[in-house]
Amino acid sequence: MSKIIKSDKEKEDLLGDMVNFQRQVGMSALDWVDHLKLMLIKMPATWTLATHNEPFKEEYIKLWIENYGEWRHCNRRTKAHNNLGMAYGWWTFKELKTFSDFKLSDAPDFKGKIVGKQLKNRKFRVAGDIGQCTPSAICNGIKSLCIHDLWISVLDWNTHIIIEFGYNPSKYYEYHICRAFSSIAEFNVPVLEQIKDVFFCKYCNEWTITKSSIEEIAKVWVSQIDCKNKSESRKIIDPIIDKCHQLSLWDEADYYS
């Protein structure tokens, strides 16, 4: 049974089931919570909670080992954790044949590809984890994904969470963590390209944000630049908003919030 999760509060509760924020590296637990809430809840993404009346069969573990070898996950993981990973792998890869490619790995625990027939047989990338993962593990997985790609958290033998991205996390990380703009004057052109790269799907020919939300998005981009006052900030934001509203793609494509 599958259920679309729309409530931000319910998503936040599930995020706590997915991620162990006590095992953080590089930032405080609160900073990691805020970061992942931005990436997974505030940004466009569809959450699906999938539950099964019958758990994955234990015989799937033996079948996985016979065909692909035993998955011996490190990082102090238990045998029960490894068994769940192998059982899920066999179930989704061989029983359901959901994936065209599937591999158990580490940080994230698995990677694969799914063929999307509705989008000219484009292969969507999937990354995911078994049980709770660290904040850095889910971030490592997300950074490799593009628009419409999936993150899957397998919580237990009956439950997993699927997150489909309505934006491009890979490009978002590139522009917001790896970017370096040398001057305000050079900012106007790159920011337009950034917004399109992150929020426009060339396969669907549609935006994943509305015109009304573009000002908020522009503010997020511009907030990374050290402006002396609000007036200076508006001088950057206003031309960006005007140019975004003039983009012909909005006349040709459907878009949603």
Image: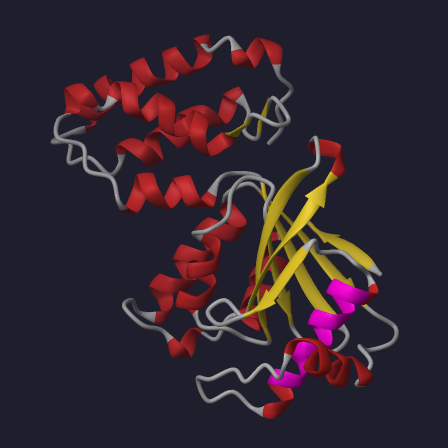
Front-lying residue, 86 or 238: 86
Residue 31 in the image: state x and y as whole percent. Answer: 34, 62
Q: Is residue 83 magenta?
A: yes
Compared to residue 110, the image places residue 251 above or below, namely above
- Position of 62 with respect to 125 (left or right) is right
- Position of 125 with respect to 175 (left or right) is right
Q: Is residue 126 magenta?
A: no
Q: Residue furthest front?
A: 67
Front-lying residue, 148 or 232: 148
- Position of 195 with respect to 69 (left or right) is left
> Where, by quadrant of the figure, is residue 252 drawn?
top right
Q: How is the image coloured?
A: secondary structure
Q: Residue furthest right?
A: 53
Quadrant placement of the N terminus:
bottom right
What residue do we see at 74% from left, 71% from top?
Answer: 90
Residue 37 in the image: state x and y as whole percent. Answer: 47, 55
